[in-house]
Amino acid sequence: MNIISCFKVVPDEQDITIKPNRDISFEKAPMTISAYDLNCIEAGAQLAEAFEGNLIGVSIGAKKIDDSKLKKNVLSRGPESILMVADDFLEDLDTYQTANALKAAIQKVGEFDLILCGEGSADLYAQQVGAQLGQLLNVPVINSVNKIALMEGKVIVERSLEDEVETIEIPLPAVISVTSDINLPRIPSMKQILAAGKKSATILSALDVGIGDFGATLQVIETKAPEQKERKKDIIQGDSDEAIKSFITKINKVLK
Amino acid sequence: MDFRFTEEQELLVESLREFMSREVTEEDIKTFYQEGAVSEKFSKAFIEAGFGFLGIPEEYGGTPADVTTLMLVGEELTRQSAAVFPFMSNILNMFDMVEFGRPDQIMTMMEIYKQTGKPAFSLAISEPQGGSDNSAMTTVATHKNGKVYLNGAKTWVTHGNVAPWTLVVCKEESPELTNKNMSMYLFAADTPGVKFSQLHKIGQTSTTFCEMYLDNVEIDESALLGEKDKGFLQLMKNFEVERLLIASQSLGLAKAAMDDAAAYASERIQFGKPIGNQQMIQQMLTDMEIKIKNMHNLLYEATWRHDNGLPIKLESALVKRYCGMTATEVCSDAIQIFGGLGYTTETRVSRAWQDARGWQIAGGTDQIMVHIAGREVLKKYKK
């Protein structure tokens, strides 16, 4: 049983700062695993442990994703190995380009039974890559999965919809995007952290996996933090009809 | 010179932060302090996450970790919580057990520790008349008809009344001042003749400590732990690491106090601006930061020495004295920045201050550290 957990490497949001001109600065933010992909890695690890499968972590991105601490971080969470395609033009890709690059990386892995993705990325949260990857690999694909039961040649998954739980049987191989409430990602112990340093990580260039420069389809003009407004400090006291009326009038005025 | 920690150490600290944010709240901590005990759930979680096995040999289910890593855990655990938990001293007690115990004694203690995450045994060393002066110890073991009889009184026995076992250090046969033969005996805390009386601390109240009375306590000769007559010498071996471990928790308390006080200084508005804009507050914060950096550098230079096989007799005493005294100063300044609020039980800084004060006494007073370091300093600079 070969399971692949895809993960995105993003700047650690805790250390993203806002400059006086409202530009968002990543200067102090180290690269880390996209938060939603922690659930995807955990889901893969639990299935691999339960079914004696082999879990591989796969990621694509700029050269900086080839970060020693980051790789240990991923490997301490369950995967037996990592495969990364790291090239500087694999940055700021659109979702379809990302799915294409992941497909090329996965083809290097070889045979797979199940590919897991997170529900979206922590930076862009487009929620498209899983679906597009399934389409590119020409295998069944489903998203928003919050429970997976693995069986011989198939999986039975659950999705919690607005007022029903949908249970779906899918033949393998397949691509599944999991929600962030599918599990609580493990907290790596010292034992797991130490073991991570001994696991294998393969870093390939775009050329190695047969992809060229996709060409930019997206151009980020600017990313600004919302403008901070001074609080109005307009306090209405009491619970009289008049006070409530005044409150509603003011709210309505602002909302219009 | 590279001041960075290893990637593994950084990842472990990140794990610990995540663990703390998931497993314990400020409300929980307040309850632990009121009830005099850390909850079973939290103790068990700490052990299950693997933190409680750091530095214990793998053959007993532990995970290899150097002293620097252990100190990082001690510091971060204390910093995240602004509180002192028994976990680090539990680990240290297990070091003594693993080092000097027989395999059957180690297995029994490890089993209890693994199941509960709570201390398997208390360590009874100090006596009413024999604290820092251990030669004045008068608890005695006498040997009759293949049995050992213990008589005497111990004090400041952490977890004495809650741990299922106790490890008592006593003199062999005679309480004479000149008698240097001490041994360690491990036995069940509910053995007939053992009585406890709880003492009440002003800080670090998430752990209890008590007086312990030994009235003709009959135990088997097999209760001996380690070598007969060499008890105190054996224990002394881990005293240096204990000093560092206490210093790491002093540092953690100081950093926690700084975290809260500096944030408060930016938020608290007086005279139309944050109090952090006032130079007298900035001076306090600046001096607190210098002290924290000094504590940090002094501590981790000593752990680096230890992990590289260099002696730390002088360094461990310097670290313990400096960090103990300085953490109290930093926490006290943090209270000052909070003003009236800092003197209430509503802030973490008041708890940190009470707890920091305790580390100036436990594990060897500030003055005993001078007694140890002073002679070493003279030796070091002798021409």
Image (tube, coloured by chain):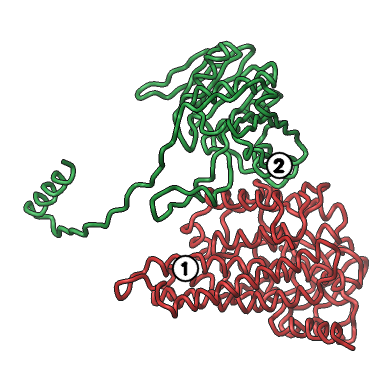
Chain colours: A green, B red
Q: Residue furthest left?
A: A242
A45 vs A220, nearest the viewer: A220
> Is residue B213 found left or right of B185 in the rendered image?
left
Residue at image x 90%, y 71%?
B230
Position of B324 with respect to A250 (left or right) is right
Asked if residue A80 shows in the view, the reply is no
**Camera sees residue B86:** yes
| Quadrant of the image occupied by residue B38 | bottom right
The kind of residue on which mark 2 rests is: Gln
C-alpha distance separating marks 1 and 2 = 35 Å
Which one is in front in this view, the residue at disc 1 or the one at disc 2?
1
Q: Nearer the viewer, residue B17 or B174?
A: B17
Picture coordinates of residue A84, whole percent (x, y): 66, 31
Identity of the residue drawn at 56% across and 72% down: B289
* Label 1: few (<14), some (14–19) or many (≥20) C-alpha neighbours in 10 Å: some
- Chain letter for mark 1, please: B
Looking at the image, residue B156 lies above or below residue B176: above
Q: Which residue is mark 1?
A: B262
Image check: A168 left or right of A64? left
Q: Residues within 10 Å of mark 2 (few under 14, many from 20)?
A: many
Quadrant where the C terminus of chain B sits is bottom right
Q: Secondary structure at mark 1?
A: helix
Left or right: where does residue B361 sit relative to residue B269? right
Position of the N terminus of chain B by quadrant: bottom right
The spot of residue B304 in percent (x, y) is 77, 64
Q: Residue B242, position in %: x, y? A: 74, 68
Residue B54 drawn at (x, y percent):
73, 53
Rendered position, A1 above or below A118: above
- Residue type (three-letter) at the residue carrying disc 1: Ala
Residue under pointer 2? A192
Where B234 falls versus B360 (above or below)? above
The residue under the point 85% across, 82% down is B380
